[in-house]
Amino acid sequence: MAFDDTFRLSAHAVITDAAGRVLLLKATYGDLAWGLPGGALEPGETIHECVARECREELGWEVSPRYLSGVYYHSAYHSQAFVFRCEAPAGTEPRLSAEHSAWRYFALDELGAVQRRRVEDCLNYAGAAVSGRF
């Protein structure tokens, strides 16, 4: 990779409910897919700052990342996605931004293969971040 090449970085939150289901948001852009809360880093921002900002913008929640569970390369987007375990504030529902039309907690067996791998890696965290390629 050359010095001037572009490369995308993003940070995402795995947030679960009391039943262990994972929170996903339905996008209002692109392919309208369901995905983890999160998004692209802004210039000068750390990955921890990014996941906290994205949760504030997309959910209206203040979250503190508990741990970084994995970093995943996505060949379709030429990007690295950092995945964090985060906790939702007690007793609150998301207040969605215009970027998302719906939110829902999904059981692990309802997730697609890529999303499921990232979430299972996060929930099975053993003290060290893992990596993967999709």
Image (cartoon, grey):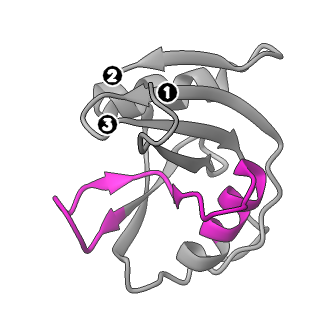
- Disc 2 + disc 3, Cβ < 8 Å: no
- Disc 2 + disc 1, Cβ < 8 Å: yes
Residue 110: mark: 3
Judged left or right of residue 110, residue 44 is right
- Give the residues drawn in magenta, as a range: 26-55
**The N terminus lies in which quarter of the figure?**
top left
Q: Which residue is mark 1?
A: 72
Q: At x 60% / y 44%, what residue is drawn?
A: 19
Residue 75 position (above or below residue 132) = below
Observer-nearest of 44 and 88:
44
Amino acid at pointer 2: Phe
Residue 134: mark: 2
Q: At x 19% / y 63%, what residue is drawn?
A: 30
Observer-nearest of 117 and 88:
117
- Distance, label 1 to label 3, CA atoms, is 20 Å
Nearest-to-viewer mark from 1 and 3: 1
Judged left or right of residue 108, residue 61 is right
Residue 27 position (above or below residue 57) = above
